[in-house]
C-alpha cells in the first residue's frame, strides 16, 4: 500500500514516539507500505521542527525522513478537482499523481468533509483511522 504523509503527520511522528503517526512508521517497517511525501511537505516540516523539542529534529533527520520517498509536487490534474483550500491542493494532487492509496493527514480544518472518504481512488484518513481500518481487515495484529 502506498501512503502519502502530509506535514501534520510528519511533525506528529517526529514529535511523539507513541502516537498513531509514529506507529505508521514503526509498523510500516513490517508492512508492505511505501511512505511518500513531497518536497513541499519536507520543507514545511523542516521549518516547523523548531517548535518541537530538539529530539524531534533528530528523529526526523535520522529515523523518519530516510524511510520516505520524496517526490516533486503536482500542480495540475487531467480531471477536475474541487477543493477550496489552495495551500493544500498540491498535497491532494501529488498524492493522486503518485498513485497513492491513502493520504494521511491530521489537518481537520482544510480536509474537513474528506476524512474516511475517497477522492477519485485516494482514501483520505488520519493515521489512527488507517491503523484501525488495517486492524479490522486483519492486516495488523492488535
Image (tube, rainbow, N blue to C red):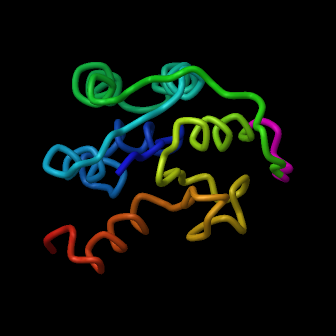
Q: Position of residue 69 (x, y in %)?
A: 38, 27
Magenta segment boundaries in residue numbering: 82-87
User: Dominant secondary structure of the magenta stretch?
Assistant: loop
Horizontal side, residue 84 vs residue 106: left or right:
right
Q: Position of residue 66 (x, y in %)?
A: 27, 22
Horizontal side, residue 96 vs residue 68: left or right:
right
Quarter where residue 41 is shown: top right
The front one of 41 and 38 is 38
Residue under the point 73% across and 52% down: 110
Horizontal side, residue 17 vs residue 4: left or right:
left
Number of numbered markers = 0
Q: Is residue 85 magenta?
A: yes
The front one of 142 and 15 is 142
Q: Position of residue 70 (x, y in %)?
A: 44, 23
Which residue lies most toward the bottom here?
136
Q: Is residue 112 magenta?
A: no
The C terminus lies in which quarter of the figure?
bottom left
Q: Is residue 63 above or below residue 33?
A: above
Residue under the point 76% across and 37% down: 77
Q: Is residue 135 above or below residue 33?
A: below
Q: Is residue 138 above or below residue 51?
A: below
Residue under the point 47% across and 42% down: 5
Q: Position of residue 112 (x, y in %)?
A: 71, 63
Residue under the point 68% across and 39% down: 93
Quarter where residue 136 is shown: bottom left
Which residue lies most toward the front here?
78
Amino acid at each position: 500500500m502506498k501512503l502519502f504523509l502530509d506535514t501534520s503527520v510528519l511533525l506528529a511522528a517526529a514529535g511523539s514516539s507513541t502516537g498513531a503517526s509514529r506507529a505508521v512508521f514503526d509498523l510500516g517497517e513490517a508492512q508492505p507500505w511505501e511512505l511518500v511525501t513531497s518536497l513541499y511537505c519536507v520543507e514545511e516540516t523542516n521549518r516547523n521542527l523548531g517548535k518541537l523539542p530538539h529530539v524531534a529534529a533528530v528523529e526526523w533527520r535520522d529515523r523518519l525522513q530516510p524511510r520516505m520517498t520524496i517526490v516533486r509536487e503536482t500542480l495540475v490534474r487531467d480531471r477536475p478537482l474541487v477543493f477550496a483550500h489552495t495551500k493544500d491542493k498540491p498535497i491532494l494532487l501529488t498524492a493522486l499523481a503518485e498513485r497513492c492509496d491513502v493520504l494521511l493527514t491530521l489537518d481537520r480544518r482544510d480536509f474537513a468533509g474528506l476524512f474516511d472518504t475517497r477522492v477519485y481512488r485516494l482514501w483520505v484518513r488520519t493515521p489512527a483511522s488507517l491503523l484501525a481500518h488495517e486492524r479490522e481487515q486483519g492486516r495488523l495484529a492488535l
